[in-house]
Image (tube, rainbow, N blue to C red):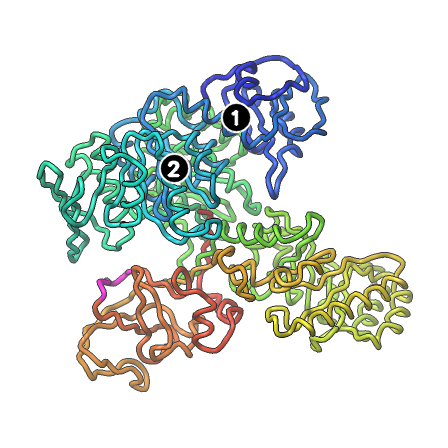
Amino acid sequence: MVNTLTPNELLHITRGEILQQGPLSSINYISTDSRKIIHGDQTLFVALKGFKVDGHDYIADAYTKGVRIFVVQHEDTDTHIPNSTVIRVKSTTEALQDLATWNRLQYEGIVVGITGSNGKTILKEWLGQILANHFDITKSPKSYNSQTGVPLSVFGIERHHKAAIIEAGISQPDEMAKLQAIIQPNIGIMTNIGTAHAEGFSDQKEKLNEKLRLFKDAQLIIYRKDHEAIHQSLQNLYPADKLVAWSEQPGGDYTLSIKKEKEGSKITLIKSDLGLYTFHSRFTDEASLENLRHTIVASLVLGLSEPQIQQSIQELDTVEMRLTLKSGIHQCLIIDDTYNNDLAGLDIALEFMNSQRPKKRKILILSDLLQAGDKGSVYSHVNALIRHYQLDMLIAVGTDIHRLKSAPPCEVYFYRDTAHFLEDFPGLSFQDDLILVKGARVFQFERIVDALQERIHGTVLEINLNALRKNFTFYKSLLKPTTKTMIMVKAFAYGGGATEIAHHLEQLNANYLAVAYTDEGVSLRNEKITLPVMVLNPVQDSFGNLIKHRLEPVVYSLSFFRQLGEYCRSNNNAISVHLDLDTGMHRLGFGEEDLEELRSLTHRYPELRIASLYTHLAGADDAAHETYSMRQLSLFQSMCSSIQSFLGYRPLMHALNSAGIVRYPEFQMDMVRLGIGLYGVEVNGLHENALQPVSVLKTTISQIKLLKKGETVGYSRKGTMNHDGKIATIAIGYADGYDRRFSNGIGKVIIHGQKAPVIGNICMDMTMIDVTGMDVHEGDEVIIYGAGLSLKEQAAAIGTIPYELLTNISSRVKRVYYLD
């Protein structure tokens, strides 16, 4: 909710012109997403023109939600919107930013601006948790730190908030100046500088200086003095009286030294006046300890006492900065969002819930919204959200949330606390439901998730749906707007789980899916996936299912064409098919010599409608094969021309896979086939920094053993300790897909950012690793593939390709999906 804004003020702020004058009413909400409009008669709709979505296409939808005032960008926007005011601006993105700047200027409280390469969101959440125990605050929802995310965050600042915490992220030069004008932080925090988003800058120094522009008008800037590059740049840019430095070593405004203990860490604080205080935390990893010390210093600067901070530190946990989709009991799907609870986060979580595949019911388990300002207004808005997202059931936990008692238009159950809900849990019937669990940390809703969640093997494959979206967007940026995308979700979507990924691809407006076998396509249809699906390896026994489930088979030979044609004719059916043309892969497909008979078959069996013609490039991932690839592409175009001449219509044409999209964009034709690239592997090695790994395979330490030099480890005594030390047994083996070729030191895993080698032979269900000299404990998380251990690096170590590692991950390894 923004400060009330009149249309005249809107016109002045955005520097726009009125295209159409309608009734004038005050504005209390600003929306860029027609799906999220609740109070339409009080809402301004800003039609952003984005890479994937053009907001001008959703003006009519916003109108049906009651909106009567619009800011548009297009010259040709239809202004004949009944009883509406339409304002045209040069850039709707800039207009949105100008409106956010105006809203910020109405606020007289403290604004904390956070930037850096890593840790921004976790620091924002931890600082927010600590401050919220003492006064009313607001903060950026999730990772809303972009050119549009920051304005939307600032719109959440209201007069009753005592402080606002806003994070800012950039990826290109000159972006921070725009964010600085919007945020205008009183207090700045610089977390660190790393390699993230480096591709837009000439060097690390340019990126650092761009980030530091956020603090141009800040009164105080908090940073870690041990980061030498940050320290030097800040000293060069800003006067000393603005800088608040902390360090592990004496010489900063605050000295915060660490001593790791068995059950956590002790942080000793020495202030410049030699005041001394000791904090205790359960965290031992370096990233968490750096974020925690930033949080401590920021809390002190904002006026909290050391005992107040220590009390709050006890409540901090490893914050899951993401919405996580998990398999639940009785075919339910669980959305786990249990780390905090506020209106902005609830709206985001409900939107995520609304985009999931349909289940029998939509159920929200919600706690009190703590430190939320005026309770009546807050719970009135919760009611509006429940109505807007058409929930079937609300389970409300807490004492304040009883204010909802008479209003929610759904089935409602109230519980005083989590314990009372769990007492009733066995009697509640959850079956094939979509359940969002959203609660403040004090309510310990992780206990509810634990009760609802399907029992899982200790090894999980986490799939980052945001990374999937970013990779998809990268490849789309290489294509013409008219080029269609076919996404390969065969082999369980390269190990990631076909159903959830296919559903997400529907949300991203992919045009086609491709699977290997008919039963994979049937499974997608049973899960309500509606996109066209191409089946690469159909067999005669599957003809009935192909037609029943509207699947489109590949036809690769004359005999298969006849078989399918006869089946369709005898059953009075028609079907769309895709013709595989062999131009040099020499695997499956029609050759040039088959085209004359293919002409005859297409005339004989009109029941087979040719949806596309395609070929496979044998060497698109290697420049050494460019001559061969070009010969294939030339032959493909020639064969397509021949086929089109006797078909009498023009099917889609496609030849490029992930590697080909990068190497031969001029041959994108009507459609491309995106496979391994979507999952974060750029096999050409030309744009690796532009992609993000989609999946992380992780497990836990089951046991730690101390061994003497010369002792042996594992089957056949293949592992030998060449020093006194310790090993850890982790809960993954070759039955989970951890290739046995990683045995005996070839494989590495990561624990707390450090690499540990495999020792001995990998077993069916377990692996031993050498953790000598490392501070690790039973139950610690272990990364098998992920940040710091790329799939390409791991595959190269055992002489294979990333495809094999991904597709070999066993089905007993549970897939967990999240949106960070």
Q: Which residue is mark 2?
A: 213
Q: Residues within 10 Å of mark 2 (few under 14, many from 20)?
A: some
Q: Where residue 820 sits in the image (x, y, percent)?
A: 44, 47
| Among the 4 quarters of the image, the one containing residue 211 | top left
Residue drawn 60% across the image and 31% down it: 47
User: Disc 2 residue type?
Assistant: Arg
Q: Where residue 525 sits in the image (x, y, percent)?
A: 64, 55
Q: Where residue 399 sits in the image (x, y, percent)?
A: 32, 29
* In this picture, residue 117 sits left or right of residue 43: left
**The residue stretch that appears in magenta:** 774-780
Q: Which residue is mark 1?
A: 30
Residue drawn 33% across the image and 74% down it: 758
* In this picture, residue 129 sits left or right of residue 349: left
- Helix, strand, or loop for circle 2? helix
Q: How many marks?
A: 2
Prevailing secondary structure class for the magenta stretch in the rendered image: loop
Instruction: Report the front residue among 629 and 432.
Output: 629
Instruction: Report the front residue among 283 and 551.
Output: 283
